[in-house]
Structures are given as structure tokens and as C-alpha cells.
Image: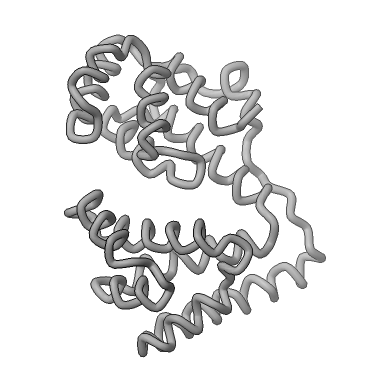
Amino acid sequence: MDPFLVLLHSVSTGLSDDELTELKFLCRARVGKRKLESVRCGLDLFAVLLEQNELDAERPELLRELLASLRRHDLLRRLDAFEAGAAGRAPPEERDLRAAFDIVCDNVGRDWRRLARHLHVTDTKIDAIEEKYPRNLTEQVRESLRVWKSAEREDATVSHLVRALRACQLNLVADLVLEDQQARENETAGSGGGDKSPAESLTSWDSNGPALGGPW
């Protein structure tokens, strides 16, 4: 089974009726009124968000924001475990690219549009990204990188990203990406290439995890 769908099912079963009402209210800007009226459980809401590409395994940020708004730290720990497991399951190249994305998102700032154009993201898509995340600069950057990765597929590499950063005169960010990659390579070599993840098993959440609604 898809681990992300397992996570969403687990989260849904842990929501009270009042919490579902709160989530529906928080999603009013993303989901139309008619669709919200048809939502009867957490899975219904998550299905709509998945369908509208507001949420997926590589973009769980919205789920994190919603759970943080509910102060459901127990459910946030389940999301943490999923993300740690996803990182451990990914091939090394994918992990390197994710780490590079994090560095770019933290350091590029408003120069992201210039970088996106060097990565051949069209102006139409750039405008759509700005409209989708009008007040979230970090998500604008991350979404532009996702669009590039989706378009380039296996050609979306750290070296390609570094070349684009240097073409934009964002040399400091490029250096940070390369330094991080070198540190990750050294760490892997020093540990003998072990990739075991300490993430808690998804299937053990309900049986071994903290009680729903329990304290932090």
C-alpha cells in the first residue's frame, strides 16, 4: 500500500467531528463551497486536496500546517515518521536533490523567478505559482523546483541545479549546495553506506504510538 495514503487514513481516523469542521474552515480558500459541503470525514477532505494537487507525498506541508493549527502533536509525529521513512527509502540521488531543494528554498529568496527561468520554467507556470502561493515565498521557490523536476525527470540533478544557480550569479547558494553534497558523501563513506532509517513503522502507529489526543 502507498505509505502516504496509509498516513492519511491514520490521520483521518484520529480526527474528531469538531476538528474536521475546523479543517474544512481552514481549507475554504482552497476548496470550493460545494465540495466542502460534501465532506463527511477526513478522508473526503484529503481526497479533494489530492485531486486538486494541493497535497501529495512529496508536498505534505499543507497537512503539517493543518495539524499544527489543531495542535495535534501526536498526528504531527506520525507525519514526521512518514517523512523520515520516505527520505530513507529514496535513492541517494533523490535524497541529494531534496537536500539541495531545501538549501535553495532557504537562500534564494525573491531571485527564484530568475532561477526558474534558467531552469526553463515558463512564465505562465511562474505566474500560476505566484497565484497559488501569494504570501508564501518559500513555497513559491519549492513549487518552481517541483515543476522543473517533474518536467526534467531523470535530467533534474544537483549538478544541473548548481549550473543554473551559477548562471544566475547565485554563487553563494551554489556553494552551499555543493558543500552540503560533499558533507553527505563523506558521511555516507564514513558510515559504510548504511541507509537504515530510524523512522517508526507506519503500521505500528495505531498499536504502539501515543494515544490520540494525548499530551506532547
Q: Residue at x 28, y 18 (%)?
A: 19
Q: Residue at x 33, y 74 (%)?
A: 108
In this rendering, the answer to whether 41 lies above or below 113 is above
State the image coordinates of residue 184 (x, y, percent, origin top left).
63, 70
Q: Residue at x 59, y 75 (%)?
A: 181
- The answer to which of 18 and 42 lies nearer the viewer is 42
- State how many labels appear: 0
In this rendering, the answer to whether 39 lies above or below 56 is above
Which of the image's four quarters has the C terminus?
Answer: top left
Q: Residue at x 45, y 14 (%)?
A: 13
- The answer to which of 150 and 67 lies nearer the viewer is 150
Query: Is residue 44 found left or right of 71 in the rendered image?
Result: right
Q: Residue furthest right?
A: 192
Decide if residue 64 is in sight here. Answer: no
Which of the image's four quarters has the N terminus?
Answer: top right
Corner quadrant of residue 110: bottom left
In this rendering, the answer to whether 63 lies above or below 14 is below
